[in-house]
Image: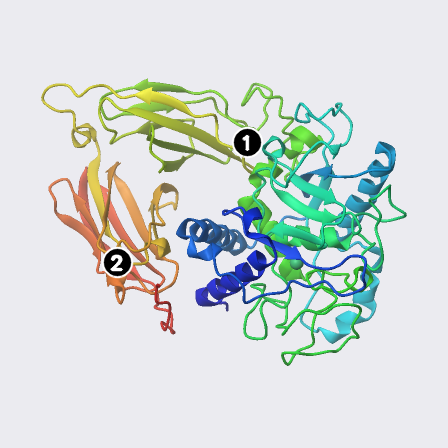
Amino acid sequence: MKSKFFLISCLFLLVICLQSCQKESEIDEFSASITEQTDVLSNSKRSCGHTDHVKGLMQDPAYERQHQAKFDRLKVELSKAEFRSCDNPVIIPIAVHFQGVNGTSAACLRQLVESQIDALNKDFTGTNADINKWTGQASAFFQNIANGEACLKFCVATQNHPAGFGLADGAYAITVNRTNGTQLSDWSGYLNVFVQPDLGFLGESPLGGLGDGDGVMIDAGAFGIGTGCGNVRPQAPYNMGRTLTHEVGHYLLLDHIWGDGCAVDDGVNDTPEQDFDYGGCPELGLSTCGSNDLHMNYMDYTNDACMYMFSSGQTQRMVAYVNSSLTAVTANAGRVCGEASGAGDTTDTGDGNGPDEDGRCERITTSTSTVISASMVQIDWSDVADAVRYRVRYREQGTTRWTGKNVTTSAFTIAGLDENTIYQYQIRVQCPQGWVPFSPASTFVTDAAADGGDQSGAECDGAAISLSLILDDYGSETSWELTDDFGDRIDIGGPFEDGAAGQEITVDFCLPDGCYILYIDDAYGDGICCDYGDGSVTLANAAGTVIGASDGFFGEYSYIDFCIENGRSRFGRERKGPKKKSLARKKKA
Ligand SMILES: [Zn+2]
């Protein structure tokens, strides 16, 4: 059981390490990254020094929120506990960008890339030639650890390349001295691999990449297998391609195996605690925290020849991260690799036509909006084949905060809008292989209010129910969901801002007859009252009568179930989830 406190401290310490390993000016404020500092030419071990340096990134609340969101999505994905069989691996398109390379040919680099990506695929699927070092020997030291086989496939893209890089259709997405830097918006939707000579370190990666044109950086002395090409020349002991395996591990949200010492876990359930990193080629059976150290793991700092496995927990975590946070990349697979990601019966050839008659599940590109009144607009779009569900989101033009709803039909009525106001909206579809990008933003303008008022309450031909949620000081832990009694989601909200204790969130629903559950979740497990503010929840009908409530003094969750019959609401009951035992925690700075 890993506590949230644990996770936060782990993250925090990690970021210190990350930032210390990079020049400050190079840090993208929205992407923590990990740099391996090793002099490639010497045989000194990999390392990432100065852990007591700057504490910066996590001090930025926006950064911390975005970073935390990755872990929240991961938790949900892991909780599903259904991992696909590997008949249909999730495809991850790769583009390789050589920068500052000389003395070689395109053909040589192509072969080098092939050798590297082949090794990457073998390492991730547990089919590397030296996995027998684990199965035949090392595994005997780790009774409770299985090696992992990630159902992922890395594919060097061959189709629909971005324009301006001189790449012909059918050629690999390999650029040579055509790019600078490690953030290329033209290459969004790819896992980019940037290869540079003389980096001064082996590699670096965001902790949890975003697929927004970011990627991993590898020193030219540690990329690929074989004799190399010009000044891209893999050198022992980093000449088996495992620097990329390690960095892609970070990109898919794996921490170093040693976390940050015996007391700080790496966030993966099956990896043993380890006090520090190993380099070189250590013997089996060494222990720093009372259990045998897993130094042959790709996320340690040992030589390429002495790291040969991911644990099962690590591969599950990576696949869950891909499914929950890298859909911008996986959704691109059909278009640029010619292979659709994941489930077998969908082929996203990405012809750019959007949902269409040839039955592909892909991005929505067109929709219509019909203004119904000063406060209501209906959005329609074409059914998308194999869609699991849709998400519609909207906001007043010029504002930053979207309001979104998930729906299962290809039409959605937005209510409660302001009169005579310009709104933006977007729609995205969840295909069997995951969410694909939002449609381009469209706009509509609501009508001016007619004389005599045009309030949304008057338009509800079911029961008008309003939710009032009072936040505590940890709004980022609080979210809510309204479902019908089949468990189908009607609406969802949160998490909210921290530091807004007492703020009231109100949401109006118009509900047909039926029974419903309002679920309030507190991610930390200490409710929303009373240690850090007096949060509470109230459901009221149009007459203002309370039909369900929570005093906020719950643990992980509170359910309020209620029913509506003939348009009249029946009083609901609350059920509370348990308080977590240890509440000694967190004092905000
Ligand atoms: Zn690392």
Q: Does label 2 point to a residue whose CB lies under 8 Å from ligand 1?
A: no
- Whether residue 271 can be seen here: yes
- Whether residue 87 can be seen here: no
Q: Does label 1 point to a residue whose CB lies under 8 Å from ligand 1?
A: no
Quadrant of the frame with the C terminus: bottom left
Image side of residue 376 versus residue 545, left or right: right
Provide residue 464's location: percent of width, then percent of height: 20, 37
Q: Which residue is mark 1?
A: 386
- The quadrant holding residue 300 is bottom right
**Circle 2 — which element?**
strand
Provide residue 496's location: percent of width, then percent of height: 33, 49
Residue drawn at (68%, 34%) of the image: 179
Q: Which residue is mark 2?
A: 574
Q: Amino acid at mark 1?
A: Asp
Residue drawn at (81%, 61%) of the image: 42
Residue drawn at (29%, 46%) of the image: 516
Residue drawn at (79%, 63%) of the image: 303
Image side of residue 29 versus residue 90, left or right: left
- The quadrant holding residue 358 is top right
| Depicted 314 relative to depicted 481: above or below | below
Seen from the viewer's position, the closer of residues 447 and 27 is: 27
Image side of residue 471 versus residue 180, left or right: left
Q: CA distance from mark 1 to mark 2?
A: 37 Å
Residue placed farthest to the left in the image?
452
Seen from the viewer's position, the closer of residues 224 and 462 is: 224
